[in-house]
Image (cartoon, helix red, strand yellow):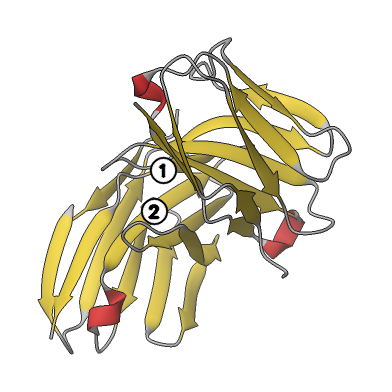
C-alpha cells in the first residue's frame, strides 16, 4: 500500500500570506495529484504531476521524485482559497489519498 | 456539460432500504472510479472500471455493494440493506490516459 502523508492537517493564514502544504508518499508512483474540496462540495483536481513543477494562477505544485515529496504553494492567499487540499498518489489503478489539509484564510 | 456528473446529489434513506447512485463520466473516458469519503477523512477507493469491465474491487466493497457499467459509459453503484455506517459522500471520477482525472460532485448519502 502506498501511504500518503500530508502536513499540516490544519492551517490558518491571513489574507495575502504565502502558503505551503506538504505531501510525502512511501513508494514509487506514476503521478501525484493535488485536489481541492470546498466545504460540502465535490473534489476538483488542481494538478497532476510526475516531475518538476506546475503553475496555475496563484497555485504552484512541485514534486521531488527522489525524496518522494510534493508541495502545494498558494501565493497571495485569499479567503476563497479556504478549502481542504488533498494529496493523492497513483501507482497503479487507483488513488491513495492523504487525509487532507484544512486551510482557512482569514480576511 | 463536459464534466463528470452524479445523481442524485443528496440521498436520505432509512436503514435497510436500497439505494442506487448514477455517475456519468466525461464522454470517451474509458476509466471510471468509485470512491467513498466519510467526514474528516480522505476518499477511499471502492471499485474501478475499464470500459464496461470491473477490474478491481476494494475489500471495503461488501456484498451489499454492487457496481455496474453496462455499456462502458455511465455507471451505477447500488447499496442494498443500507446501514448507518454507509453514510458518506460517494465520489465518481473518470480518467482518460494523459488527460488526468476528473471528479464528479459526489452523492451525499445519509442513512437514518
Which label belongs to residue B106?
none
| Marker count (numbered) | 2
Dot placed on the residue nearer the N-terminal end, 2 or 1:
2
Which label belongs to residue A97?
1
Query: In x, y percent, where is residue B16?
Result: 47, 14
Query: In x, y percent, where is residue B42?
Result: 36, 42
B38 and A47: which is toward the camera: B38
Query: In x, y percent, where is residue A68?
Result: 39, 50
Q: Secondary structure at mark 1?
A: strand
A52 and B98: which is toward the camera: B98
Q: Which quadrant would residue B56 be assigned to in this image? A: top right
State the residue at coordinates (37%, 86%).
A58
Which residue, given by chain and number where applicable, does mark 2 sit on?
A87
Mark 2 and mark 1 residues within 8 Å of each other at the beta carbon:
yes
State the residue at coordinates (61%, 58%).
B102
Query: In x, y percent, where is residue A39?
Result: 31, 60
Q: Which quadrant would residue A37 be assigned to in this image? A: bottom left
Q: Which chain letter goes with mark 1?
A: A
Amino acid at each position: 500500500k502506498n501511504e500518503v502523508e500530508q502536513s499540516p492537517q490544519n492551517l490558518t493564514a491571513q489574507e495575502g500570506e504565502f502558503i505551503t502544504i506538504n505531501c510525502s508518499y512511501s513508494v514509487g508512483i506514476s503521478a501525484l495529484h493535488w485536489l481541492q474540496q470546498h466545504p460540502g462540495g465535490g473534489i476538483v483536481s488542481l494538478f497532476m504531476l510526475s516531475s518538476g513543477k506546475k503553475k496555475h494562477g496563484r497555485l504552484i505544485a512541485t514534486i521531488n521524485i527522489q525524496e518522494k515529496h510534493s508541495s502545494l504553494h498558494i501565493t497571495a492567499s485569499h479567503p476563497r482559497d479556504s478549502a481542504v487540499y488533498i494529496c493523492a498518489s497513483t501507482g497503479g489503478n487507483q488513488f491513495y489519498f492523504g487525509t487532507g489539509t484544512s486551510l482557512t484564510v482569514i480576511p | 456539460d463536459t464534466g463528470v456528473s452524479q445523481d442524485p446529489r443528496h440521498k436520505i434513506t432509512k436503514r435497510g432500504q436500497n439505494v442506487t447512485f448514477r455517475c456519468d463520466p466525461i464522454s470517451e473516458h474509458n476509466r471510471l472510479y468509485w470512491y467513498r469519503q466519510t467526514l474528516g477523512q480522505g476518499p477511499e477507493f471502492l471499485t474501478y472500471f475499464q470500459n464496461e469491465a470491473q477490474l478491481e474491487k476494494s475489500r471495503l466493497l461488501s456484498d451489499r455493494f454492487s457496481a455496474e457499467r453496462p455499456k462502458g459509459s455511465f455507471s451505477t453503484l447500488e447499496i442494498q440493506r443500507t446501514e448507518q455506517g454507509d453514510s458518506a459522500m460517494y465520489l465518481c471520477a473518470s480518467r482518460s490516459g494523459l488527460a488526468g482525472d476528473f471528479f464528479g460532485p459526489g452523492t451525499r448519502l445519509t442513512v437514518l
